[in-house]
Structure formats: structure tokens, C-alpha cells
Image (cartoon, helix red, strand yellow):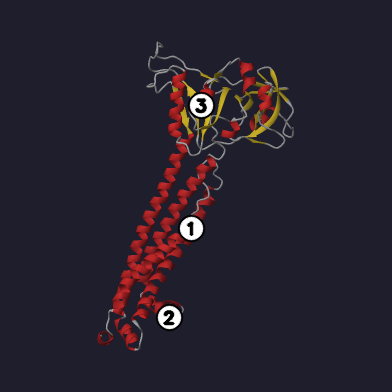
Amino acid sequence: MNSFKVIFDRDTWQEIFGSISKNKIRTVITIIGVLWGIFIYIVLSGAAKGLDNGFERQFENIAMNSMFIWAQQTSIPYDGFKIGRQIELKLSDIDFLKKRVPEIEFISPRNAKGVFGSSSPLVVRKNKSSNFNIYGDFPEFTKIATKKIYDGGRFINEEDIKYKRKVCVIGEQTQAELFEKDENPIGQYIKIDDIYFQVIGVHKFIPGGGFETDGDIFIPFETFRKLYNTGDIVQWFTIAAYDEADVVAVEKDIKTVLKSIHRVSPEDERAFGGFNLGEIFNKIVGFARGMTLLSLIVGIATIIAGVIGIGNILLISVKERTKELGVRRALGATPAEVRNQIILESVFLTVVAGILGIILGAFVLAGINAATIDMTDFPYTNPTVPIPFVLGALFIMVFLGTLIGLIPAQRAISIKPIDALREE
């Protein structure tokens, strides 16, 4: 009860402000020490979160545990085969991989014309023509990499695959080059390598989706096989593992299974290539978490240094107010009342410094956000610090302020009234 009485006592606050006003410069310098600590914590934590948010935005349209696997040439002779044998992935590999690598959630074979050094097919519509990359895909591909289709259109479905339909999904650039500005391409026909395809959708280009561009055309995988006579050959697999799976281990297991299927030496590290988006994303998340931890360590260390400075100020203040404290004790002030006043002064200075640091940090983060809000190509957006983290930092500051205030408070109540009154 005495503690609450001190907090709401007008005379207590008058004495606190009177003490602060006697040493304004010294008090301001000390407050800056604590302010700087919470400011560093807020800015670094917010910056780390902005980086985390930025990469999440870059990966929002593709599974975070995804990877690409393709075949290359052998680098080790094995099982009667010479070095330099070109490996070819097959559609039949999919069943083996699903059975022997249970961590695989989705797997989609892909073929393409216009990538990996091959020439882009000529696409013609009436008197307009241009070269675009052509992809042969299954509907399952969109479960790994989202395709945003404009209203009125759709992506490839199972019926398209089953009946080898000559349908296609075109890109924004394809539409711009082959169609009039206000013309709806849905239901219209274009010629791909002299074969007519009906347009069933227009996809919005999203950076970060692998090798793709804003002019790509997607057709059913089975139709691609028939058009280009690729048989069972697959250029690469796009694979997504379950969220809880170790993507690095999954990639290793996939390559091990493929080596077994295609009679490749288990020691051959060049026969199959891979690009593991999940591994990259996990490294980015780890870096962001490391930044957050670093900001916490640096911020707390700076806060502690500032709080110690407040403790030193109060020790000096207690020494300067020895006679005043002696008078209060002689007039009936209890040791608890004197202790609570000193602690309250410590907590007050700490909280004021903390709030100022949070406000200043919030302004800086708002400035960073305003400067990067339109930078869609740069993986950075919305640098913020969660409210629980801010409240947690304030709680730590109150705790440290109380703790450090106990030292000058104990010094104050150790002064005997008679000795204090003799002090000159």
C-alpha cells in the first residue's frame, strides 16, 4: 500500500522533478544512454523483420520448401558406363521418387522450349508474330508455384492433359504483342510452331518464379510431348517437400534415388543438378533471426549501460540531498517511503528514456518503410517490431530501473537523521 501511496503522492513527484531539474544536463545525458539502447533494439529488430517480410513476399507465390532437379552428365564411370554419359529424367521416375522419398508433397515434371540454350518457338497471331518460351506443364505445378490468372481465364486442368488439348495460357507480354490493346484474348487462337492453340487464360508475371518471364506460354504437358515428340523425357522436376521436412536432406535423398534408377555412381555429385529454394529461404530466415537476436543483445547491453548511468546519477543525487533526506527522516518519513521515492525516480527516468527511444525508433522505421514501399524488386518491406517485443523491452527496462534504484535507495535509508542534519 505504501508503494501505491508514494506513486500517487503529489509531494513525491514534486521532489522527483525538483531533483531532476537541479541536474538537467547530467540527467539528459544519462537518459540518452538508455534511449539509445532501446532505439538500437527497435531499429535493428524492425530492419530484420523488414528483411524477413521482404523474402516472404518474394517466396509467397512458390512453396518455401521447393526445389528444381535436372539431369546432367556423369563424372565417374560406373556399372560399365563411361564418364560423360548424358542422363535423361523420365516420367516413370516420379512413381519411384514418391515411393522412396515420402517427404515429397508435390512433384511436377516440366519441359520447355526457349530455355537452357534452346531457341524460342515462333508464335503467330494474324499478322503479328514473336518468339516466346513454351512450357509443358501439369496442373499440379500450380500447387508448387502459384499462377495468378486474370479474371475470365484459367490454368491447365486434368481434362486438358487427358485429351491432349491444344490450349494455352499466355503471358502479359504475349498478349501485348499479339493482341490489340482492348481485345480479350480468351477464346482466341494463336499458332505455336504452325499449330493452332486456343487461349484459355492470361497469367500475371510474378518475379521469383524460377526461369520464367512475362511472355511465357504454358501448354498441357501431354500436348507438349506430342508437339515436340519428347516421349517420356523430362527436362526437370519441380518438387515441394512437406513443411516440416529437411529440404537439404530431401534433395540428397531424391538425387540418391535418381542415381539408383539411372545407374549412376553414388559418389557422382555432377550427374544431377539442383537448385534448392527451401535451403536458400531457411538461410534467409536464419539470418533474420540472427539479426533479431543481435539487436536484442546489443539493445539490452546498451540499456543496461544506460540504466547503470541512472543509478550513478541517483547515488550522486542522494549524496547531494543528504541533509534533505535527514530532515525528512527527522519529520517522520519511514525508510520504506524514502526507498520507494528513490526507486520511483529511477523507474521514471528509465521509462521516459524507453518511451522516447521507442518513438524515435518508430519514426526511423516509418521512414525506411516509406523509402522501400515501392521497391518490389528489392526483398524488403514493412519493417516493424511486434507489440509484445516492445512491451517486453519496456518491462525489462522497468525491472532494471527498479533493480538499479535499490542501490541509491539503500544508500539513502542508511543515512542516520542526526548525521544528515550535521552535514554541511
Location of mark 2 (residue): 14
Q: Quadrant of residue 115?
A: top right
Farthest-out residue, bottom? 331
**Residue found at x 43% / y 32%:** 249
N-terminal of the pair, mark 3 or mark 2, is: 2
Task: Give the residue pinned by disc 1.
Answer: 388
Label 1 CA crowd tier, 10 Å (few <14, some 14–19, many 20+): few
- Which residue is identified by label 3? 99
Looking at the rendered structure, the kind of residue marked 2 is Gln
Residue at left offset 57%, top offset 19%:
119
Q: Position of residue 125 (x, y in %)?
A: 71, 23
Name the amino acid type tagged 3.
Lys
* Kind of residue at disc 1: Pro
Q: Earlier in the sequence, mark 1 or mark 2?
A: 2
- Left or right, 77 with respect to 188, comes to left
Instruction: State left or right for residue 145 relative to residue 29.
Output: right
Category of crowding for the residue at label 2, using alpha-carbon neighbours closer than 10 angstroms: few (below 14), some (14–19), many (at least 20): few
* Residue 78 to residue 247: above or below: above
